[in-house]
Image: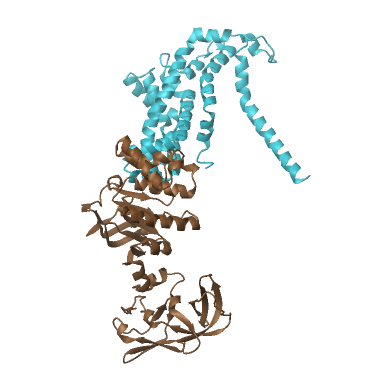
Chain colours: A cyan, B brown
Amino acid sequence: MTLNQQRKLKTILTGLFAWSVALVLFFPIFWMFITSFKTELQAISVPPSLFFEPTLDNFRIVQERSDYIHHAWNSVVTSFGSTIIALIIAIPAAYSMAFFPGKRTKDILLWMLSTKMLPAVGVLVPIYILCRNYGLLDSKTALVIIFTLMNLPIIVWMLFSYFKDLPKEILEAARMDGATPWDEVVKVVLPLSVGAISSTALLSIVLCWNEAFWSLNLTASDAAPLTAMIASYSSPEGLFWAKLSAASTLACAPIVIFGWFCQKQLVQGLTFGAVK
Amino acid sequence: MSYLTITDLQKHYENYHALRGINLSISEGEFVVFVGPSGCGKSTLLRTIAGLESSTGGSIELDGRDITEVASSKRDLAMVFQSYALYPHMTVADNLSFALRLAKVSDAEIKEKVRSVSASLQLDALLERKPKELSGGQRQRVAIGRAIVRQPKVFLFDEPLSNLDAALRVQMRLELARLHKKLGTTMIYVTHDQVEAMTLADRVVILNAGQIEQVGTPLELYRQPNSRFVAEFIGTPKMNLIPANRILRNEDTLSIDIFGQQISFPANRLKGPLPDSVVIGIRPEHMSLVETDGDLTGRIELVEHLGSEAYAHLQLSSDQTIIIKAPARTELKDGQEVCIKIDTSELILFNENDRVISVIPEEA
């Protein structure tokens, strides 16, 4: 085999591998999507039917039974709200740690990350009691606070690692030009980190959107986001696969569409630091 | 009257003493160059003046005001960085006007100032471009323009030319000299390149290991270094340093023995007592090749032709080579035995502590 042929073969093999991994990962989503257009009978038929007459009944029932719009709105408020608050806290924190590191900056960063190693269930009871005592059970406020705290370490870390790579001299030049710390952040650091901040925000939104543990435990109906709505379809009367699929499809859809538009930022966000 | 006064300035890092008591006064309008080998503290000194590093002792006074504890943004200094440090997200025009906009200068005035600065630096055609669309030389000019436009009290330059290629560096050096002439503003310039220091400076400050080694005009430093460090640092090719074996004093002259050959030196040019051993220093251009009656003889090892002149490497003994300047069209051959005459009025003597112990005669 010539070198050229070897190279071609390698391309084909890596392509094949990548595609099969992608298909394996995509298959459950695809299956959920088509199941949502089946009747309950078709959904559990063995062997599964690939060709059927699609129906929109499931979607109609889901909206009627559990008010999809209401839950979607809760998801939007909690994930966007908590992300914005987390960014407002994380940007100055990451800025000061990246540009004015002290002796203990590394320790603080590690300590923040260490909070992510604690299993959430370990603090469930105290947090539940706190929420109950403050009348925050089944409220969006409680979810926003929890989501903010939950994602803060990740957001600080991501922004910190990006800010750290910004050339220090640019900030020093701004300082020499008469910029106050506020000017420095608003007029230099933020415009230079639009990409990093939006990808970080996107990641945080996705994480909040997918969050189920706290949503299920702290909300009942008023503040229940989409994750809690889906869970309500695994009921004691048995599983209704088609309706469950319809609910899941509806729950995923907004974030998939949103993510599609922000694909570029998302990839950059997940890989920056690693590639650069 | 001193414009910028630095008194006993200290900078300690965790386990490193970067500035060890710097005392310096700079007059208004002066062009001062800090020069020294890497790690000597020259950039630290500049950054401390800028306020980008905090000092751990001593004081800095600018135009009658103590600025030691003042924030960089309030010191009224402008700085040009080695990496240019332009704002990548702004156009050239925005880069130039950034400081003015922060200072809330009126739009009309900003426009006028940006226009005049960009015209004087030939940036008019580039005003709408982003820094990444500019060449290195253009970026450097924007960085300089950004400093000029503010009309600061002092310009600080941190190795501004070291990222440029050789030809451009010479051209920018000239532009900077012109700029200083035109603006008449005080400038402090850091470089490790002694040619830049010599050509640009009114006064050169030579730093070594966090201390000032010597301050003087370029020619003073060249002719009257006060230590071996300065003597070796200034001048290309380097000053020749030859250890003398023995010195004898007979009345008015010192007789210095170099590899068995004698050089005589007037005793009245000696400062202080005669040490046991000395090193003599002589620049390549202060020696000449002669037919007879020379001070030293040696064998030509190598001749370097530079076109306008030539440098001959001469072997005095098995482990001592000196460089001597020769006429451009010299016909010296490798391996040839030659006689050289030393211009003793330019001879410098160093003691065992590398300090200079001779004086240069006035009239020469």
Query: What's the residue at 40%, 43% (across, down)?
Result: A98
Q: In the displayed image of the protein, which residue is found farthest to the right?
A: A1
Let me know if residue B335 appears in the view: yes
Query: What's the residue at 49%, 58% (across, down)?
Result: B166
For the residue pair B99 and B180, the one nearer the viewer reads as B180
Query: What's the residue at 31%, 43% (across, down)?
Result: A178
- Residue A157, located in which quarter of the rendered image? top left
Q: Position of residue A227 (x, y in %)?
A: 49, 19
Query: What's the residue at 29%, 54% (across, down)?
Result: B55
For the residue pair A194 and B157, the one nearer the viewer reads as B157
On screen, residue A205 above or below B58: above
Q: Looking at the image, how many numbered discs can be counted on the residues?
A: 0
Q: Position of residue B16 (x, y in %)?
A: 36, 59
- Residue B177, located in which quarter of the rendered image? bottom left
Q: Position of residue A114 (x, y in %)?
A: 43, 38
Let me know if residue A147 appears in the view: no
For the residue pair A23 and B296, the one nearer the viewer reads as B296
Q: Quadrant of the N terminus of chain A?
A: top right
Q: Position of residue A259 (x, y in %)?
A: 52, 25
Q: In the displayed image of the protein, which residue is found farthest to the bottom?
A: B250
